[in-house]
Every structure is written in structure tokens, then in C-alpha cells.
Amino acid sequence: MTAIPAIATVIPAAGVGKRMKADKPKQYLPLCGLTVLEQTLHRLKQVPALQQFYLALSPDDPYFPDLPLAADRQIQRVDGGSERANSVLNALIQIDAQQYPWVLVHDAARPVVRVSDIELLIQCCLQNEQGGILATPVRDTMKLATAENTVKQTVDRTTLWHAYTPQLFPTVLLREALQRALAQGVAITDEASAMEWAGWPVQLVQGHSDNIKITQAEDLALATFYLEHSV
Ligand SMILES: Nc1ccn([C@@H]2O[C@H](COP(=O)(O)OP(=O)(O)OP(=O)(O)O)[C@@H](O)[C@H]2O)c(=O)n1
Ligand SMILES: C[C@](O)(CO)[C@H](O)COP(=O)(O)O
């Protein structure tokens, strides 16, 4: 077993949840007696290596101060940005990379992540000294579409994976990669895409597909099922 150092955690939670079409951002919707954000923090806090949490919130977020989490001294609030990548970068800038050489980034909107999968990701990355992400191989037959939405061809699925969070990288490398990629206008949908763009290897660590992202209304019912059946 590799010795695990303290790891900083960034939680992007500054989105508005357009696709959810609710009366508040999805991270504040109720899920099994807590908010989505609280469920996510509850999972992350069960991992002993995760010690300091940088929570990126909209600067005018009116909901967070009412949660008990607001009094949690392990949580540092930072201002979110216009896109997810800007929110993550704002948090990375606050982290002392000497104290926390590795940083784990996890969406507030993924409340069902398994503690054992987070621990597996940490173990694989530290053991191989290489950043990585939780992911699962695609299961269905995959099609490449034409502009007219007809099938151009069937794609080899053996090399295709779904990318999830958490994603774990050396703090300095991720900060530099994100800064440079954003400055050059590269489209960055997750941390791995910045690291790939900068030329760093990214491991795929197989997790579980119940690590869903709450995106649309029906996802809440599925997350409720998974939480109630305590995966
Ligand atoms: N400017 C942004 C946009 C998103 N996020 C966060 O990034 C995670 C994943 O983003 P997504 O699911 O796209 O959330 P939203 O942007 O809120 O959703 P939508 O695209 O439907 O508006 C969420 O925890 C969200 O709060 C963020 O911190 N800052
Ligand atoms: C980071 C992410 O959750 C990985 O699956 C995802 O990229 C978030 O953004 P999306 O636009 O909802 O895919």
C-alpha cells in the first residue's frame, strides 16, 4: 500500500442548473433528507485523505449560508467563474501546493460516488505517480453520426470510456494546464481535458456507473434509488 498524503479537494458548485429547470440550482435540491451538495460532501468526508475542501460557489449564492456546512472549518468558500473550468481554476489558485501536492476535483452534482471508488482512484494515482479519473467503459454499441443524424459508421467501443469525477492530479501541473488552456480558448469540459491538451498522461480508473451526474429531473429519482440502496 502506498502512503497517502493529505489531498486538497475542489468542489465546483457554481453552476445554475439550466438543464434541471428547477427554481434553484440543482446542488440545493433535496435528496434523501439533505441537499445534493450535502450528500456529495458527506461522501467525500468519509475519505480520510481528503482534508481541506475548496467549494466554488456563485458569488451571490443565497443558499449556502443557510446550510450547516457553512460553519464547517474544513470548507473554504471561493468564487465560481463563468464556466466550470473557471470555477475550478479559481479554487486551484487558493491551494498551497507544497501543503497539498495533489488535488482531487469532484462535481457537487455527483452525490452518489462510492467512497471505495474514490479510494481506488487515490491509490492508483499515487502508486503510479500519475493523474487519473474515474471512468467506465461504454456498454452500448456506438454510432458515429452524419450531420443529418443518420449513421455514418459503427465505432469500435473497446477504447471508449465515460469520464466521471473525481479526477486527481498534481496541483501545480493541473493549475498550469488549466491556466494555459483557458488563456488559449481551448474547450475544457473536465480537468483531464486540460491535462491531455498539455501533453500529460491521464489514467482511466474503472469506477461504477452509478456515479451519475444530476443533470435533469429524472436523475434525482435514480440518485434517490442508489442512495436508499446504499451503494
Ligand atoms: N460556471 C460553473 C458551471 C458549473 N459548475 C459546476 O460544475 C459541475 C458540473 O456542471 P453541470 O452539471 O454542467 O452543472 P450546471 O452548469 O449547473 O448545469 P447546466 O449545464 O444544466 O446549467 C456542477 O457541480 C456545477 O455546479 C461550476 O462550478 N461553475
Ligand atoms: C466533469 C464532468 O462531470 C465529467 O463527466 C462533465 O464533463 C461535466 O460537464 P457536462 O457538460 O455536463 O458534461
Image (tube, rainbow, N blue to C red):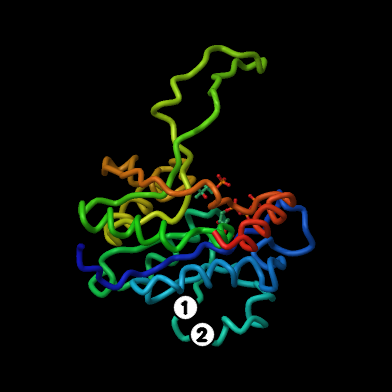
Kindly identify the residue that appears in the image at 48 percent across and 39 percent down.
Answer: 162
> Which of the four quarters of the rendered structure image does ligand 1 lie in?
bottom right
- The secondary element bearing badge 2 is classed as loop
For label 2, the residue is 72
Instruction: Kindly identify which numbered label has been placed on residue 42.
Output: none
Q: Residue at x 53, y 52 (%)?
A: 211
Q: Say which of marks 2 and 1 sits in front.
A: 2
Q: Position of residue 175 (x, y in %)?
A: 33, 58
- In the picture, measured across the screen, residue 111 lies left or right of residue 134, that is right
Secondary structure under the numbered disc 1 in the rendered image: strand
Residue 49 falls left or right of residue 113: left
Of the 4 image quadrants, the one containing the N terminus is bottom left
- Residue farthest along the right direction in this orientation: 23
Read off the residue under disc 1.
76
Characterize the local packing of mark 1: few (<14), some (14-19) or many (20 or more) Cα atoms within 10 angstroms. Answer: some
Q: Amino acid at mark 2?
A: Asp
Q: The residue under label 1 is which amino acid type? A: Gln
Picture layout, residue 93 above or below residue 157 = below
Neighbourhood count class around disc 2 (C-alpha, 10 Å): few under 14, some 14–19, many 20 upward: few
Q: CA distance from mark 2 to mark 1?
A: 9 Å
> Which quadrant of the figure has residue 51?
bottom left
Q: Nearer the viewer, residue 85 or 225?
A: 225
x and y percentages locating residue 151 in the rendered image: 60, 14
In the displayed structure image, the side of residue 152 where residue 88 appears, left or right: left
Q: Are marks 2 and 1 in contact (CB under 8 Å)?
A: no
